[in-house]
Amino acid sequence: MVVLVARLAPDLGPKPLYLDEAVSGLTAVRPFGEMVQIVIVERGGPPVHYLIAHVATALHPSATALRVVSFLAAIASVVVIYDLGRRLSGPFAGGTAALLAALSTFMGIHGTFGRPYAVFVLTSALALDLFVRALERRTIGATAWAALAAVLAASTHPYGFYVLVAEASAGLVAWRFRPARGVAIPAGAAILLIPVILSLRRLSERFDIGEGSEAIAKPRVAARQLLYALEGSAAGRPMFAVVALLVLGGLVVLARDRPLVAGVSLALFVAPPALYILVPSGSDGLSAINPRHLLFLLPVWVVLAGIGADWAGERLSKGARPLLLVALSAAAAFSQFEGIDDPRTKVPELAANGSPSAVRGVARFLEHEVQEGDVLYTHSPSYLAALSASARGTVVDAQPGDVLKVGLERVSFPASGVIFSAPRGSARLDRARLTESVGAGNAHVFGRWVVVRMRGPFADEAAALNALVRAVGGLDRALLGETTRLAEFLERKRRGLCDRLVQLAAAQPEGC
């Protein structure tokens, strides 16, 4: 825990704000009923993460609140991972697993990232720990807690269903399919999954998962994603072979002593790449996969390594065991995996746009400018920087799956105004042309950000969309020089608005 706090605490504030964090914050800060509607009907997403983030932003509406949630979840996961290793092979295995987890590349990034991944590690570790406990005790109470923890993991991230299905299958075997324990308790817990399943259905619709003729990923890509996830979970690439040998040894020991737990562990490694290869996707399948989605494997990987280290340590002298632990920890500390990037700093231009100094001015402006009933376009880090003010308006965005259409249904018209905040970065602007396009007093430039504020009222959806088309198009026409990234961003956002206007009017609107 001390190691992890020392790694993560310095990153809570200074790291640049990122688009995905803006989605989390701008969703979580909404009133509870509206937040549920966004998560289940509009976008699809992990309900547990948003519930926790909703409480955090209610206490302190800021990006820091989101990051503190991940920070606390990461620290708590070290404790649970230790307990899982201790249950399976004793304190040495638990301590080794906890240190490897605390030193992993994934923890170093997602422990301060305002998204669900650190919470996902925690709930996955908790589900596995309580599952082992239930196997030990074989009581109805222990089974119920294990079932609830598995549901919690599935409610934190869609890939938590791997944990849920693997444990439920093993549970049926362990209790010999007896209804009272093998079926009734998990079935009762599964009632809690109804909103999760609805949100997953929406998410799959948006990305056309299960449709089309092409698989989500080819075998080579699926295997690479799994490899990246394991390398990012402990010790990085230089030490990967050593850790993999310890994991293999741990799996052999587990298969001998606890075959059901070994079966669950093996299933969790095999299932994700298998489904990547077997399940079709009607759109770009690669957008639906990323090593961070496989973070439920982190507890399994480090605990198996801990069990393997414990087995190896038993064959050493008593004084050599601490040296083995120190050697593994030192290797993990200096062997971070560079194949897993921090999205907040991966692209220098975006990192500069989201830096605290870059968003300070635009946030101060938005805090005074956003009014009740405003429509804010796109999930922008600038809106996240002024989260308490942004909560007064309604944020909508053009995303796959009619997200803009559904989002606009949450707006109470007439809208008092529309706001479009764009990261201009280092792009140069023709201020006179921008003013001519959007009107005097409507464009405001703050270093790397430009905000177009069109005052209403706008009587209906079409009027608001036309005003946003004017704002986005005006900024596009004002660009000077080489601005490929910004021009592509503006074109995507303009096209999303125009597509919706065509749906409303069945004709090509002005400016489209």
Image (spheres, grey):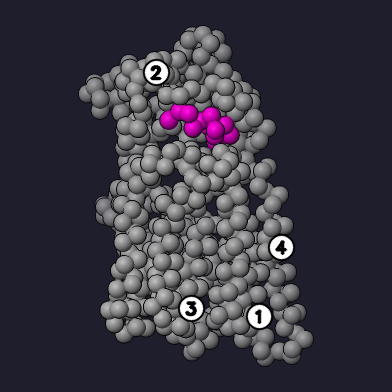
Identify the residue under disc 3: 133
Task: Tell me where the magenta segment starts and ends, as one range.
Answer: 381-394
Q: Label 3 amino acid?
A: Arg
Asked whether disc 3 touches disc 2, contact meaning CB atoms under 8 Å apart, the reply is no
From the top left corner, tell me how far across and down residue 2 is, in percent: 71, 62
Q: Quadrant of residue 186?
A: bottom left
Amino acid type, mark 2: Ala
State the image quarter where residue 109 is shown: bottom right
User: For residue 467, which numbered disc appears in the image?
Assistant: 2
Horizontally, is 346 left or right of 257 in the view?
Answer: right
Depth check, front residue: 487 or 251: 251
Dot 1 or dot 2: first in sequence order is: 1
> Magenta: predominant secondary structure element?
helix
Residue 435: where, in percent of width, then height?
A: 51, 11
* Residue pointed to by mark 4: 2
Residue at mark 1: 92
Q: CA separation, marks 4 and 3?
A: 27 Å
* Residue at the image point whose x is 47% and y is 83% from the top: 136
Q: Earlier in the sequence, mark 2 or mark 4?
A: 4
Badge 4 or badge 3: first in the primary sequence: 4
Residue count near mark 4 (Cα–Cα under 10 Å), binned few <14, some 14–19, many ≥20: few
Q: Quadrant of the C terminus?
A: top left
> Which is nearer the N-term, disc 3 or disc 2?
3
